């Protein structure tokens, strides 16, 4: 039985002489010409071989298991009987196959209850229906898994869109002065939460507060200057006043245009650094 495969169809009798077409070092035009010559030469031989195969019943597809997807089974069945040619397909499976053990337990229990010998082949519509039901179950489960994966992927994708939109805004020259002041306010809040969270002033660590403040801006405040504050709100006002004073001093020193440029550069570095640490940072937005 000779069969050569062209595209999706198995052409009966097409493999008349394997390896007769040696194309090493041959140009495209020569390949086409050589192929046409060989096709004409072996056309009658291929036709005769095909007739022999058809007389024998055509292509027989033998499956040793059933796939989780009915589409794969149907594709295998479809290899036989193409283009009007005769053909047949048959599948054999074991009760120990994963598909049967996991999703067709009812069929297994029915078979086991009959007390058949292990060597006796079982042919019953009940088993066939159980297999199809199991395949439906698997396909539904796999479809739900794919749906969930797509939903989960939307979360980081939305994050990527937000990050890239924010970077575009910064690059387009948005005025970041208000955001810079808001960032300073956030820093002051964090400092107070760390060192002045207690309601009792004696529990405040003003020296550590001033030391940490100096890592963000060249603070002019001293612990003694903060010790007179009775509440954390008063400490906040003192720190925020010092931060804004330092910021406005730099703004006056550099000029508005230069200050806005520095703010954009700093903002981009912060965004990029944080995004690189994010699990999705290496992927572009969809």
Image: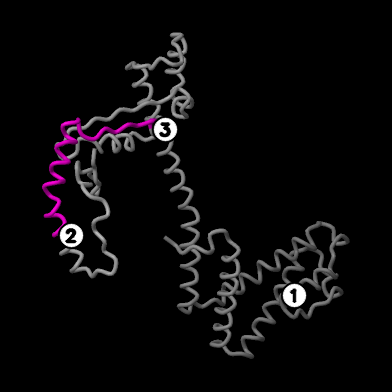
Q: Residue at x 34, y 21 (%)?
A: 128
Mark 1 in CB contact with mark 2 (< 8 angstroms): no
Q: Give the Cα distance between marks 2 and 3.
A: 46 Å
Vertical comparison of 151 with 33: above or below: above
Residue 138, quarter of the rendered image: top left
- The front one of 60 and 198 is 60
Horizontal side of residue 42 vs 172, given as left or right? left
| Quadrant location of the N terminus in the rendered image | top left
Vertical comparison of 252 with 217: above or below: below
Question: How many residues crowd around disc 3 within 10 Å: few (fewer than 14), some, or many (20 or more)?
Answer: some
Q: Give the Cα distance between marks 1 and 2.
A: 77 Å
In this figure, which residue is indicated by the disc labeled 1? Answer: 215
- How far across and how far down the image is residue 184, in percent? 66, 72
In primary-sequence order, the first of circles 2 and 3 is 2
Vertical comparison of 211 with 257: above or below: above
Q: Is residue 63 magenta?
A: yes
Horizontal side of residue 164 vs 229, given as left or right? left
In this figure, which residue is indicated by the disc labeled 3? Answer: 138
In primary-sequence order, the first of circles 1 and 3 is 3
In this figure, which residue is indicated by the disc labeled 2? Answer: 35
Eye-nearest disc, 1 or 2: 2
Label 1, secondary structure: give it: loop
What residue span does the magenta drawing correspond to? 37-66
């Amino acid at each position: 039985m000779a069969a050569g495969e062209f595209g999706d169809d198995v052409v009966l009798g097409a493999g008349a002489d394997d390896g007769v077409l040696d194309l090493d070092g041959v140009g495209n035009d020569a390949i086409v010409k050589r192929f046409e010559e060989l096709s004409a030469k072996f056309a009658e031989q291929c036709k005769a071989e095909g007739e022999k195969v058809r007389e024998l019943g055509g292509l027989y597809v033998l499956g040793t298991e059933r796939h989780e997807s009915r589409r794969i089974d149907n594709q295998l069945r479809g290899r036989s009987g193409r283009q009007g040619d005769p053909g047949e397909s048959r599948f054999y499976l074991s009760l120990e196959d994963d598909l049967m053990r996991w999703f067709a337990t009812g069929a297994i229990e029915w078979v086991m209850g009959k007390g058949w010998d292990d060597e006796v082949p079982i042919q019953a519509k009940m088993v066939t229906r159980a297999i199809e039901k199991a395949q439906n179950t698997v396909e539904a489960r796999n479809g739900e898994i794919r749906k969930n994966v797509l939903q989960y992927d939307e979360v980081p994708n939305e994050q990527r869109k937000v990050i890239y939109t924010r970077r575009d805004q910064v690059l387009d020259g948005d005025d970041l002065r208000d955001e810079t002041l808001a960032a300073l306010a956030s820093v002051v809040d964090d400092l107070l939460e760390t060192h002045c969270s207690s309601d009792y002033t004696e529990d405040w660590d003003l020296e550590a507060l001033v030391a940490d403040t100096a890592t963000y801006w060249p603070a002019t405040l001293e612990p003694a200057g903060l010790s007179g504050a009775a509440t954390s709100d008063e400490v906040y006002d003192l720190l925020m006043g010092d931060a804004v004073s330092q910021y406005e001093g730099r703004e006056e020193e550099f000029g508005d245009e230069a200050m806005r440029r520095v703010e954009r550069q700093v903002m981009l570095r912060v965004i990029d650094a944080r995004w690189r640490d994010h699990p999705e940072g290496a992927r572009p937005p969809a």
